[in-house]
Amino acid sequence: MTERGFETLQIHAGAQPDPATGARQTPIYQTTGYVFRDVEHAAALFDLKEVGFIYSRLTNPTVAVLQERIATLEGGTGAVCCSSGHAAQIMALFPLMQPGCNVVVSSRLYGGTITQFSQTIKRFGWTARFVDFDDTDAIAAAIDDSTRAVFCESIANPEGHLFDIPAIAKVTSKAGLPLIVDNTTATPYLCKPIEMGATLVVHSTTKYMTGNGTVTGGCIVDSGTFDWSASAKFPSLSEPEPAYHGLKFHETFGHMAYVFHGIAVGLRDLGMTMNPQAAHYTLLGLETLSLRMERHVANATRVAEWLENHPAVESVSYAGLASSPQHDLQQRLYPKGASALFCFALKDGYDACVRAVEKLELISHVANLGDSRSLIIHSASTTHRQLDEKQQVAAGAGPNVLRLSIGIETVEDIIADLEQAIS
Ligand SMILES: *Cc1c(COP(=O)(O)O)cnc(C)c1O
């Protein structure tokens, strides 16, 4: 299948007619357990000597199709799905980190991720160092002997700020560290971080990948290219694992070591499992990913251009605008578009934002993005509420800023709704 086009792969990768029934669409394998052929088969599965289905906390055939589909679309060697995007982030870091270690992260991130990284991971003895990822020297300067990973979003929530992934990957590979890219807002249709040098890609499949606001989910894709044994920094992958009779994941599974660890240790012990119903909805959504993203980009471009010329609007952050300082980067690295998530600032400040949100009729006030419906949120009073004003501004979520996630409705209707709300 490797030579086939994106539009083919988003429908077919990982799936085949059901061997038991011939069902053409991937069935929802709504089961927790799987019957072992015999005791020897069961023992081989538990020892990781044979790959197969044991229990749905670890593996499930519907989820397995989704894992292979996302891995294929991202150009990775394999993937692990989990219960949400936030679960994917913890699961991605888990094999890499130990108490006392740090991860160097972009200051422009989804608000919930800033909270997860600045507060919650401290309970595991991990810390995050927040740096401006437009400044590659600052990334290099923040890395020390205790750094185990570097993390950023390709198209950053909430402003739709684009990052130069190849430049960032150069810094991390020089430091001998894995680069983790959250590709939620871009999707593999607009950006392929692995081709640009990323080691791991994480997703909140809750957003554009599913595309209709039905289920939460997450995914971690491994490029399969990182040498986990090149240093002593990643003992979970390079050293004997006591729970599997001293098996060494990297030595035994090679380019699949990280993915197998994610399932056999990560899902086994953290239990952040994606359920087969969620995988089904996401598989359906992925079938139209390219079509939806094209329309999302076209609509977002029209709306951003309209907003930019509106007298009540102070600024628009969309990187797809010809006037954007990021326009050259967009043309070079994100030629199919800058997704459909961006912010605009109103001249009249916080109160005008609150008034506009209340007047909108078609566009819903929702803490989600990447839906077929257009959504808006006033980040400063919601998703970025836990941050102080300095952090809010650094994250692109100042008090007079509204975040839009432009849907795939008739674009004139989206503009008309904004017009009546902000004029
Ligand atoms: C929503 C989001 C997350 C968190 O994902 P959930 O599925 O809500 O847990 C992480 N990163 C980005 C960029 C997101 O938009």
Image (cartoon, rainbow, N blue to C red):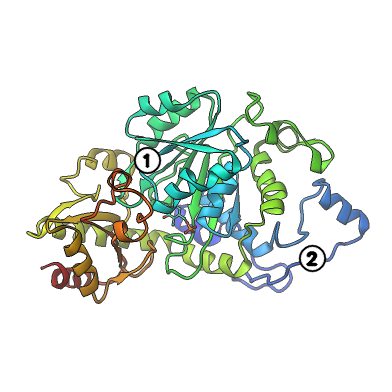
- Name which residue type carries label 1: Ser
- Name which residue type carries label 2: Tyr
Q: Position of residue 293 (x, y in %)?
A: 36, 59
Which of disc 2 and disc 1 is earlier in sequence? 2
Indicate the quadrant containing the C terminus: top left, top right, bottom left or bottom right.
Answer: bottom left
- The total of numbered circles placed on residues is 2
Residue under the image location 51 percent in, 53 percent down: 86
- The residue that disc 2 covers is 34
- Say if 307 sits above or below 18 in the image: above
* Extreme residue in the left direction: 311
Residue 135 shows in the view: yes
Point out which mark residue 124 bears.
none
Tell which tag, 1 or 2, sits nearer the viewer: 1
Dot 1 alpha-carbon crowd within 10 angstroms: few under 14, some 14 to 19, many 20 or more: many
Q: Nearer the viewer, residue 4 or 128?
A: 128
Numbered disc 1: secondary structure? loop
Q: CA distance from mark 1 to mark 2?
A: 44 Å
* Quarter where residue 261 is shown: top right
* Quarter where residue 167 is shown: top left
Would the CB of label 2 be found within 8 Å of ligand 1? no
Q: Position of residue 331 (x, y in %)?
A: 27, 42
Q: Nearer the viewer, residue 395 or 71?
A: 395
Ligand 1 position by quadrant: bottom left
Numbered disc 2: secondary structure? loop
Point out which mark residue 107 bears.
1
Residue under the image location 9 percent in, 57 percent down: 309
Residue under the image location 43 percent in, 27 percent down: 142
Dot 2 alpha-carbon crowd within 10 angstroms: few under 14, some 14 to 19, many 20 or more: few
Labels 1 & 2 near each other (Cβ < 8 A) = no
Q: Nearer the viewer, residue 53 or 314?
A: 314
Q: Position of residue 202 (x, y in %)?
A: 51, 48
Residue under the image location 31 percent in, 69 percent down: 365
